[in-house]
Image: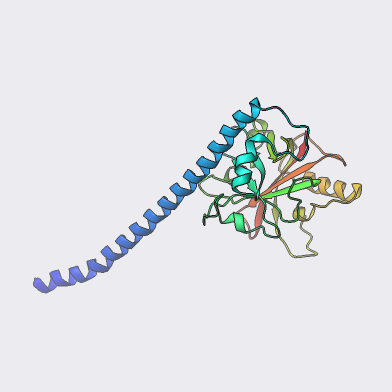
Amino acid sequence: MAKGKSKRKLILIPLYLTLGLLGVVISAYFIKEYQSRNNMAEVQAAARKDTKKGQQAAKSDDPDAVLPRFQKLAAQNPDLVGWLTIPDTVIDYPVMYKTGDNDYYLSHDFEGNSDKNGLLVLDKRCTKKGNDLNNLIHGHNMKSGTMFGALHDYTRKAFYLTHKTIIFSTLYEERTYEIVGVFHSTLGEKNTEEFQYYNYISIDSKAEFNDYIQGVKEKSLYDTGVTAYYGDKLLTLSTCENTGENGRLVVVAKRK
């Protein structure tokens, strides 16, 4: 009998150790997730507070003057280039830019701490002021729904019909956009036949612009009834799409 009990104890000890280690890992995950959300909440609260102050301040005629709502945050982190909001969704986040680097802020928070949620990132090929004809913004597709996780709701036209507007404010001006198309894509090698939406940033001609809009419309999951014409300013939002290798979900909008 004693030997049987000893064997059971020997079997249970590794099980207890495994469960204990699993508990530590799970606890660490939730602690980091809490810290990430708490840090973001503080940045969002600061932006809202400064927005109220900005509404009371006189508007500057200087096109290079930073909007009052961003002055404190931009001083805190000069990599801030603006703010992206989709009303009535969780998407209400700062947009960051690091010269020559698309990856840093996909794994760090506003204060530079390691964070798997990351932040939204203006593509390194864009200009920091966001004055390109097409501004491309990247963000993680988080299972928790944070960052661009909620962007996947746009695969349903019913959701689009109640969320047609996107607001991307640079440090210098408020901008409102209406959605042109929503589609799935794949990151591919050069010369692939796949529509390379991510290479249409520095659009140099009307023909190239029309090629881009035609590609967006052809791949779009549904017709939004909105199109864009050469001269319109565009906004492209891109996130991972898990149904295929290197899959992406893309939302393209034009400035109103």
The answer to whether residue 94 of the structure is visible from this angle is: no
User: How many numbered circles are shown?
Assistant: 0
Residue 122 lies left or right of residue 133; in this view the side is: left
198 vs 152: above or below: below
Residue displayed at 78% across by 45% down: 131
Position of residue 228 measured from the top left corner of the image (x, y, whole percent): 82, 39
Q: Nearer the viewer, residue 70 or 208?
A: 70
Q: Nearer the viewer, residue 144 or 129?
A: 129
Determine the residue located farthest toward the left in the rendered image.
Answer: 1
Q: Nearer the viewer, residue 105 or 239?
A: 105
**Quadrant location, the C terminus:** top right
The answer to whether residue 18 of the structure is visible from this angle is: yes
Residue 14 lies left or right of residue 96; in this view the side is: left
Position of residue 218 measured from the top left corner of the image (x, y, whole percent): 79, 46
120 vs 158: above or below: below
Position of residue 86 measured from the top left corner of the image (x, y, whole percent): 63, 36
Q: Nearer the viewer, residue 62 or 4?
A: 62
Q: How is the image coloured?
A: rainbow
Determine the residue located farthest toward the top in the rendered image.
Answer: 56
Q: Quadrant of residue 170?
A: top right
Residue 15 lies left or right of residue 246; in this view the side is: left
Residue displayed at 65% across by 35% down: 68
**Quadrant location, the N terminus:** bottom left
Position of residue 245 measured from the top left corner of the image (x, y, whole percent): 63, 60
